[in-house]
Amino acid sequence: MAAQFGRRLRKGAATTAVAAVAVAALSASQAPGVNDHGRQTAADATPSPDVSASDGSATGNSPYYTDLPPLKSPNPSPSTGPSPSGKGETEAGIPATVLDAYKKAEASLRESKPGCNLPWQLLAAIGRVESGQARGGRVDAEGTTIGKILGPQLDGNGFALIKDTDNGAYDGNSAYDQAVGPMQFIPSTWAWAGRDGNADGKKDPNNIYDAALAAGHYLCRNNWDLSDQDDLDKAILSYNNSREYLNLVMRWLDFYRKGTHEVPDGTGTLPGNRSDGGSGASSDRSTPAGPAAPSTPGQGASKPKPSPKPEKPGGGNATPKPPSTPPGSTPPPSTSPTPTDTVDHLENAGPAKLTAMAGDAFAQRISTRAETKAGKAVAKVRVRFTILGDTDTTFTGGESVATVATNSSGVAVAPALQAGEKTGAVTIRATVVGRTVAGLDYTATVTERAADKLARTSDAALTCVAGGEFAAPVQVKATYQGAVADGVAATATLVKSAADATANDKGPYFKDAAGKPVRTLAGLKTDAKGLLTLPKLYADDTTGTFLLRITTAGGATLTVELTVAAAETSAPSPSASPSA
């Protein structure tokens, strides 16, 4: 097996020219802007202008594999044996465990976020581009990669500059971050996006089940609907903010949608070319990280020649720089501080007060300004917002952590907050990613659901005879600012009078579980339509007019009149004549 992988890796450098020809051929073979399914292609899709407002990408814009899918479309095959002959069929083969992880992630997201419409083929496309499907499916029985898959250290030498955020816990590098695992998450993103996809109690970026589920949730955040091309573009660009990356992932997505088949683990095809000018699979932990590091230890892959002008992720050429520092060694002193290095503190940029009713979205969003010691705004700094404590309040999309880059004014605006059902104060903490600066806490208050109006759903008079029961139960509808008020707490009391709200000791009553009379019902709630239907009412022997008062959280009150009439008496029967 090692020899087989070595041969594939040695072929990598030779395929660069072939890939360039394939790009031109593929472009010429398709009508601009339309693919075989009639959808707009990524090549002609315009990225959303707010993509750059995110934390950059899941991968830190690390290098990726640029190999294109074959021009010949694959034919769907139910076989599970080795890949059939033919380039299209070979490239369409996905290692069994990797394919299973993608499909399980899709099934999980279909239940937890059905509006996202995540196709597993999108995970396969990203997995192909990021790691060559976990280096051709080199995973163990639990789905964990055999050897860590690491991207180059992000030290600013041809890549983004992201200083260590995990103390080397995931990538083994305490100086700079590196993308980790088959889906290539950087540690700072995995810290909040990580998932346990194989239910082993751990969130491991090196496990394909965990990584695939995390990638699915990452792509489904912000309420994106991936069946919509604009949202799909935003999601892919948020993974790696590069137009070329978007185009490439869309090519593989369309390719896999036309047919795939399962191949044994470890026999998948490996990509040969990377966006940084390197070749072969991503570097292993035992291999010094760098732009052109060989991918898999102990396989004898030839060292690729660096391109004189390696391409930056995201387009453009970069001037060659000195080799990056291997993991574990002391990084060279920086000649100029990064924006993150200049941040001295965070300032509250608004709002002063955050309040929302349970189940509602907060109308205002948290804003944080990054400043230098002199109070100058700092742009392009990543600020992480974390919801603390035991609460079911989340950011839109169901996440409890969001990372946002500051704009030109130094301000990072958090995603909208969605109030849960737990009421009370919620703390949201803002911190600077990659720098030890005191966090800034915000307090959001979740109030109980409320109604400002109650109305009966029927105008029928509520009457009963003494000792009898009312024919129909009392039903009311609650609204708040004209909208249905669902889940609102209510209390119903048979009061003594309009001026005395204490419970009456005579007249109509409800029955408790034991059948005993009660004249106050607490803990009631309106249903999804804002309706509240009270239990059946009964009358004792007291006649007259009585009042039922219903109150809700928010101050809505309704008083209903009940009438109890005397029972009808039957006419006396004719008496017999008195005896003489």
Image (spheres, rainbow, N blue to C red):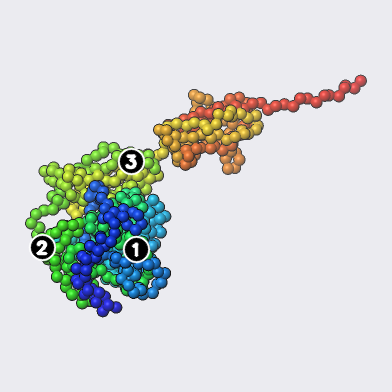
Q: Which residue is mark 2?
A: 321
N-term mark: 2 or 1: 1
Rendered location of residue 62, percent (x, y) = 21, 60
Task: Report whether residue 170 is seen.
Answer: no
Q: Which residue is mark 1?
A: 256
Rendered location of residue 493, percent (x, y) = 52, 32
Q: Residue at x 40, y 55 (%)?
A: 110
Q: Which residue is mark 3?
A: 362
Q: CA distance from mark 1 to mark 3?
A: 40 Å
Q: Secondary structure at mark 2?
A: loop
Mark 3: amino acid: Phe
Rendered location of residue 278, percent (x, y) = 18, 67
N-term mark: 2 or 3: 2
Q: Residue at x 22, y 56 (%)?
A: 242
Residue sticking out furthest to the top:
580
Q: Nearer the viewer, residue 223 or 356?
A: 223
> Is 101 on the left-hand or right-hand side of 572?
left
Residue sticking out furthest to the left:
335
> Is 158 on the left-hand or right-hand side of 114?
left
Mark 2 against mark 1, which lies toward the viewer?
1
Q: CA distance from mark 2 to mark 1?
A: 37 Å
Say above or below: 502 vs 47: above
The answer to whether the residues at label 2 and label 1 have Cβ atoms under 8 Å apart is no
Task: Report whether residue 63 is seen.
Answer: yes
Q: CA distance from mark 2 to mark 3?
A: 47 Å
The answer to whether the residues at label 2 and label 3 have Cβ atoms under 8 Å apart is no
